[in-house]
Image (spheres, rainbow, N blue to C red):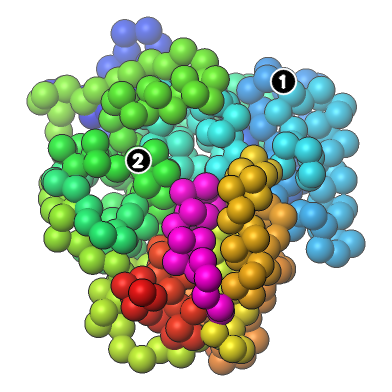
Amino acid sequence: MGMTMTQKVLAAHVAEGATVRAGELVMAKLDLVLANDITAPVAIGEFPKFGRERVFDRTKVALVPDHFAPNKDIKAAAQCACMRAFARAQDIENYFEVGHDCGVEHALLPEKGLVTAGDCVIGADSHTCTYGALGAFSTGVGSTDAAAGMATGEAWFRVPSAIKVVLRNAPRGWVCGKDVVLRLIGMIGVDGARYQSLEFTGDGVAALGMDDRFTIANMAIEAGAKNGIFPVDDICMAYLSEHGAKPPRAFAADADAEYEREVEMDLSELKPVVAFPHLPSNVRDVDDAGDVPIDQVVIGSCTNGRISDMRVAAEIMRGRKVAPGIRCIVIPATQRVWLQAMEEGLLKTFAEAGCVVSTPTCGPCLGGYMGILAKGERCVATTNRNFVGRMGHVESEVYLASPAVAAASALAGRIAMPEEMK
């Protein structure tokens, strides 16, 4: 029996010519270890317990202050100071200070070319699975595993089985990667791919740009998946070349690879969707959402804070005003996206519409700051989770949607279709 794409990447990091099977426990060599200002201090505290004075490779550790940065309070400042001191002491090449080359980690690392096809990456953040869009095996781990990775350059895995997700045709209208992944999660459930690999294939892949693929891979964890992964095609190769990534290693599933099941999606039949509280699987078509008044909109995050997301939101908002009483917060995911949005006039469009534009930060996505919800408030967000209390009070509500739906909703003061803003 052959190997899936994920299994091939893992096998290549176990040993030359190795074969792995679902369920096996393996030790794999790592190409990158990631941590942020919440998870890095814990990993740094554990690091000395591995008996190492130096990280295994200062070029293969990335530390990104993005969750509570710029610092929101004294505790956040202490966490960032801990990470900053460790980065200096270890001479970490890929430490990204606020205001210099800053950004939300899972948008920043691909943008910087730090991940390439065929890499094996762990990060002390659950949405590390984002880099599967580049044909890498990437997954979230705990801070102790991240410490072990920084010390040894290796991590252990139970080799995941896989679900083949066959994408057909091309999306229409305002449908984007966010709608694809929310609909998929709605189909299989938040535990439908538990500790499995979501492996995307089919002619529909070519109809999805890299930003769509990043969004889909990012939310693989919301279906319980160990990782999500896309084939390395011309679109992926062009992105890697544009961003200066190291030479890729393209792996493809064997023809006789074994899958737990197959899920097929016709992208041409999808409509814009919204995930109602309090699960990403609670998905409805926007035109079936009913009259749901809102208080806030957040456009950004590692899921949907890239330049294409900014452009879509600005297109809908241009020449219009955010509804009275609605707070709309726009957060470009990286400094580069922020600057590009400024140069293209998108930030002016947002400001003139009545939005707040922030420096790159995770901020409200995890209920950190820059948009916390009070009791009873509702928010439409392009973020990745809508669990109870995710963005603030336990009696607040988060509705997950695409940048197009979020922008339209900000203008309407309720969950709305982009087509309404004509």
Which part of the image, by quadrant, shows the C terminus? bottom left
Q: Secondary structure at mark 1?
A: loop
Whether residue 317 appears in magenta in the rendering, the answer is yes
- Left or right of 234 on screen, residue 325: right
Circles 2, 1 touching at the beta carbon (< 8 Å): no
Q: Closer to the camera, 34 or 361?
A: 361
Q: Closer to the camera, 13 or 265?
A: 265
Residue 58: give its label: 1
- Left or right of 315 on screen, residue 93: right
The residue located at (52%, 55%) in the rendering is: 310
Find residue 353 and report its image quarter: bottom right
Whether residue 399 appears in magenta in the rendering, the answer is no
The residue located at (15%, 37%) in the rendering is: 203
Q: Position of residue 384 (x, y in %)?
A: 47, 61
Which part of the image, by quadrant, shows the N terminus? top left
The residue located at (49%, 85%) in the rendering is: 413
- Amino acid type of the residue tagged 1 in the rendering: Arg
- Left or right of 4 on screen, residue 389: right
Region in magenta: 301-322
> Up-down: is 8 above or below 130?
above
Q: Main secondary structure of the magenta part?
A: helix
User: Comparing marks 2 and 1, which lies closer to the viewer?
Assistant: 2
Q: Position of residue 159 (x, y in %)?
A: 34, 33
Q: Position of residue 82 (x, y in %)?
A: 85, 44
- Left or right of 262 on screen, residue 397: right
Reading the image, the residue beneath label 2 is 209
Is residue 389 visible in the rendered structure shown here? no
The residue located at (42%, 44%) in the rendering is: 211
